[in-house]
Image (cartoon, rainbow, N blue to C red):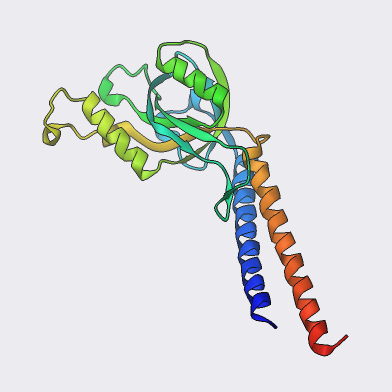
Amino acid sequence: MSIKKIIAIVALVLVVYAGGYVCAFSVKNYLKFALGAERTIDYMSPSEIQSLQRVNGTIDNRYKIVIGVGDAEDVTPTLLGFPIGEHRERQDFLLLLNPDAKDEDNYRYCIIASSDEEIIQKLSNMQHGGEESFEFRGIVQEMPLNKHDMLTEYLGDYFSDDFDIYMRPNVQHHIIPCTILITDESSDEWILPIIIGGASALAGTAVIIIIAVKAYRDKHRY
């Protein structure tokens, strides 16, 4: 077998591996969202919110969007570094889960996020005092460390009037280390990576088989 064919097969193996990984990972996430038990955050205490839960609820004046967290980040699905779906940007917001708590020391916060432009606009409006309510469904994910650090810094400023960073209170008990990702199972955010990842793996496998069969025939002269 020639060097060019060996290089082609190695490249195709990488495509098959990447496509299979994207497909398997996306199927896992889809099943986790589509089949998991769903709870309503309206009737949950903040301490009950945990990673990998499916949740629904209503964002209205019972909850409080405090502030946008960081800049919007690109979450466009990719395969081998190439985008495989429409461009998406996810925006995170700080959500006060229990605004009815009588003591600020009992306030609990998490992140709520979306890559849907309409929902992002609604959350932004609520951040600035808007009162338009909307229902949502989503999945709870573990809060990334960089976002946890952002909340720690923000809440440290919020709960302290002292500009000395060494004198700020410990705010870790205010943070529920989870992100509520607003989404739905009909979104191509779930389906498209499954289709493209699976198609890439199958196509790569087919081409490898064709190359191998041709090389075998060339070697044995038939």
Tell me where residue 130 appears, x and y as whole percent: 45, 11
Tell me where residue 173 appears, x and y as whole percent: 28, 34
Quarter of the picture containing the N terminus is bottom right
Closer to us: 1 or 50: 1
Can residue 62 be seen in the rendering of this structure? no
Which residue sits furthest right?
Answer: 222
Residue 199, by quadrant, is: bottom right
Query: Going by the image, does 137 lie left or right of 50?
Result: right
Can residue 161 be seen in the rendering of this structure? yes
Quarter of the picture containing the C terminus is bottom right
Closer to us: 27 or 69: 69
Query: Going by the image, does 142 lie left or right of 190?
Result: left
Query: Going by the image, does 81 lie left or right of 130?
Result: right
Residue at x 65% of width, y 53% of height = 23
Residue 204, by quadrant, is: bottom right
Tell me where residue 91 appears, x and y as whole percent: 46, 31
Q: Is residue 112 above or below residue 148?
A: above
